[in-house]
């Protein structure tokens, strides 16, 4: 696992890491892209998330760069698992949508809806014995 939410890693170094994984016959690259500390991923539909969640404009992965990393890994037999950590770890999202962080239940409902808007799938999550299926 590489955590680029807390420590930005340039694309050439990510590719070297993937090459090293291939040399050692590792076949899964768990990429922790976003977290509380930053949201260094280009969101075209919601650009404020990127703008308010990035460390600096130079420390953002564009969608094309992410696709390039996925292709680079695929050609070496490595599966990329990008991690978008929600409903927890959403402080970076809260900087763009301040009203989203007012209660645990609202966080779950709003993030579920947020996932639906962006990724067009329903996010199901059970928290403290309460399951919310939307």
Image (cartoon, grey):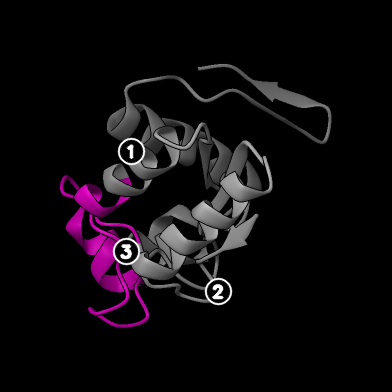
Q: Residue at x 61, y 49 (%)?
A: 23
Image coordinates of residue 40 in percent, x first then y, are 37, 65
Residue 53 on the magenta span: yes
Q: Residue at x 26, y 54 (%)?
A: 65
What is the CA distance from the residue labelled 2 to the residue labelled 1? 24 Å
Q: Which residue is mark 3?
A: 96
Residue 106 as seen in the image, left or right of residue 45: right
Near-viewer residue (88 or 7) = 7
Q: Residues within 10 Å of mark 1 (few under 14, many from 20)?
A: some
Q: Which residue is mark 1?
A: 71
Near-viewer residue (71 or 127) = 71
Residue 23 as seen in the image, left or right of residue 130: left
Q: Residue at x 62, y 38 (%)?
A: 28
Which secondary structure, mark 2?
Answer: loop
Q: Nearer the viewer, mark 1 or mark 3?
A: 1
In which quadrant of the rendered view does residue 3 lie? bottom right
Which secondary structure, mark 3?
Answer: loop
Residue 47 on the magenta span: yes
Q: Considering only vertical position in the picture, is 32 above or below 92?
A: above
Q: Write down the region rendered in magenta.
A: 41-66
Q: Which residue is mark 2?
A: 6
Which secondary structure, mark 1?
Answer: helix
Q: Nearer the viewer, mark 3 or mark 2?
A: 2
What is the CA distance from the residue labelled 1 to the residue labelled 3? 30 Å
Any part of residue 122 in sight:
yes
């Amino acid at each position: 696992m590489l955590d680029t939410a807390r420590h930005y890693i340039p694309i050439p170094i990510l590719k070297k890491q993937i090459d090293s994984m291939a040399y050692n016959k590792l076949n899964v690259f768990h990429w922790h892209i976003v977290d509380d500390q930053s949201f260094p991923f280009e969101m075209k539909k919601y650009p404020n998330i990127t703008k308010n969640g990035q460390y600096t404009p130079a420390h953002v992965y564009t969608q094309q760069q992410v696709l390039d990393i996925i292709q680079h890994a695929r050609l070496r037999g490595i599966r990329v698992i990008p991690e978008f950590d929600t409903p927890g770890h959403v402080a970076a999202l809260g900087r763009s949508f301040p009203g989203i962080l007012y209660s645990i239940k609202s966080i779950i409902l709003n993030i579920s809806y947020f996932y639906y808007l962006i990724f067009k799938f329903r996010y199901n999550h059970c928290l403290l014995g309460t399951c919310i299926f939307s």
